[in-house]
Image (cartoon, rainbow, N blue to C red):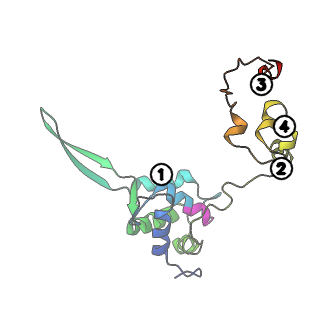
Amino acid sequence: MAEGGMSLEQQFVNFSKFGDTKSDGRTITLTQIDKWLKQAQVIGKKITTTDTGICFNKFKYIVELKREDVIINRMFLLRSKTIDCPTFIKFIEDLAQQKSIPPPEIKDKLASCGLPGTTKATQSVSVGAVDRLTDTSKYTGAHKERFDAEGKGKGISGRADVADNSGYVGGYKGQNTYDKTH
């Protein structure tokens, strides 16, 4: 059990479900492993994502798929894109051995890195350019008509020209003056 209170197996389930709504937590992909290793700060100068990809390919399951063709029956071998938890532990041990790092050191980092998250992945930027571009008081022309005095959008009435279905021709200036002259 790591200092964060979660075991490596619990973290495996958490990271295998992260970003994959269909995952049941029993297998994990290379992308999820790389995310986990980056969050645990294992990937860096000594271990790269290329190293993890090469090592991962050693541990993929080989799945047999039978497909019947019209002429002959063939046996196809497919490599899965996921590995399970016991295989993941072997993967970590093999990766550590290749890079001359003690496996318990990597396992401790993985167990204590916390729940998967998107920390520092996409942060909102509020520098001068963004503030200037989103300031509706500086809009000109047709764009300024899309916002009210407070800077809030008017919705469809600010985006579309509403047709005047009164029966008058578009350029006619004397609308509603006929009764006054006759």
Residue at numbered disc 1:
54
Residue type at tag 4? Tyr
The answer to if 94 sits in the magenta stretch is no
Residue 10 x, y percent position in the rendering: 47, 74
- Badge 4 marks a residue whose secondary structure is loop
Establish if 132 lies above or below 106: above
Q: Which stretch is magenta?
A: 36-41
Residue 137 x, y percent position in the rendering: 87, 43
- Badge 1 marks a residue whose secondary structure is helix
Residue type at tag 2? Glu
Q: Marks 1 and 4: in contact by CB < 8 Å?
A: no
Residue at numbered disc 4:
139
Residue at numbered disc 2:
150
- Who's the residue at 87% across and 39% down the image? 138
- Who's the residue at 78% across and 19% down the image? 178
- Badge 2 marks a residue whose secondary structure is loop
Residue at numbered disc 3:
176
Distance, label 2 to label 3, CA atoms, is 33 Å
Question: Which mark lies nearer to you, 4 or 1?
Answer: 4
- Badge 3 marks a residue whose secondary structure is loop
Distance, label 4 to label 1, CA atoms, is 53 Å
Distance, label 4 to label 3, CA atoms, is 34 Å
